[in-house]
Amino acid sequence: MRMEIRSIGRGAAPGATLATVAMAAALPTVALLTALLTALLGPAPAAAQSAAALRFHDPMPLDRGTEIALARSAAPPSVSAGAAVLVLEAGRFVPAVEGTNGVTCYVARSVPGSLEPHCFDREGSATILPIHLRRAEMGYAGASAEEVDAEIARGLEEGRYRLPARPAMSYMLSSAQILYSDEGGRAGAWRPHLMIYQPGLTSADLGLPPEPGTPVFVVDEGTPESVILVVLDDFVEPDLAESDRVAIEAASLEHDRRHAGT
């Protein structure tokens, strides 16, 4: 499979707009544990809309080949070539491609119209991803946020899930990603970036200014859901024809339109 790397150049350093999109992963929580699970282990910076009821609702369908290509485009070809790939079928994420390097790629859909290709490293695949998937699949099936939080908390207590033993990383480099801000604004491809999950981290720990103003900043710093966001210059282009890209964008906009004002 062929994928290309496309540079977006070295424009202005990320500021408020970058922070707004990055903060979209922070879901409403009821306790410290669910705060950790929601922001540390939820999609980030994932699509989100002001209506919380739309989270994990009516995911956009994709044909299998397109979904695999989009999933792989989350990471450089040198990483994604050996990755396992999951696809969404009947409300559940199922294996489509076996991997060899411990990386797992899939296309998250947090809200109607969003497409969020992720590739998790080995630790992320073992810890963040299973919770990520369970949260999404329960939401697609109609479970409430409270029911999902309770299920994940039980899973952690019973040992069905675990938290990362080291910093865990997700690649989000696809030029075809369609992201939303926490206010529901469509951010489109936004910027290629890495998410490094590290609870308790602060900007000061990294010698960074308190406000986002560099290509590296900390989201929700000093909390259990702290994440280092590293903005990169180069997108990865999915191995898709231009007509397929146009069709995906049109389908996303239609999904968005149908749910506007919900």
Image (spheres, helix red, strand yellow):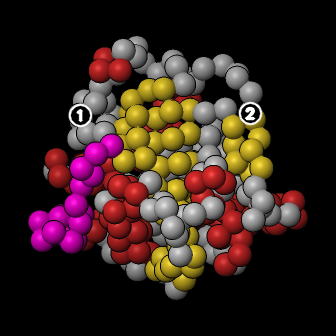
Residue 50 x, y percent position in the rendering: 47, 50
Residue segment shown in magenta: 149-167
Q: Nearer the viewer, residue 14 or 146?
A: 14
**Tag on residue 8?**
2
Look at the picture and state if 183 lies above or below 141.
above
Residue 48 x, y percent position in the rendering: 49, 52
Q: Residue at x 37, y 38 (%)?
A: 227
Q: Is residue 9 left or right of residue 132?
A: right
- The quarter holding residue 258 reads bottom right
Residue 259 x, y percent position in the rendering: 59, 64
Q: Which residue is drawn at 62% across and 40% down?
A: 192
Q: Which amino acid does label 1 sit on?
A: Gly
Q: Nearer the viewer, residue 111 or 155?
A: 155
Look at the picture and state if 149 lies above or below 24.
below
Q: Bin the neighbour count of mark 2 within 10 Å (Cα to Cα): few under 14, some 14-19, many 20 and up.
A: few
Look at the picture and state if 54 lies above or below 47.
below
Residue 153 x, y percent position in the rendering: 18, 64
Residue at the bottom extreme of this rendering: 90
Q: Residue at x 51, y 18 (%)?
A: 213
- The quarter holding residue 243 reads bottom right
**Can residue 67 be found in the magenta stretch?**
no
Q: Split into 4 quadrants, where in the image is the N terminus?
A: bottom right
**Residue 176 appears in the picture as rendered:** yes
Q: Residue beneath label 1, please?
A: 200
**Distance from Cα at disc 1 to Cα at disc 2:** 31 Å
- The quarter holding residue 156 reads bottom left
Label 1's element? loop
Q: Given contact means CB atoms under 8 Å apart, are the residues at marks 1 and 2 in contact?
A: no
**Residue 188 appears in the picture as rendered:** no
Q: What residue type is labelled 2?
A: Ile
**Tag on residue 222?**
none
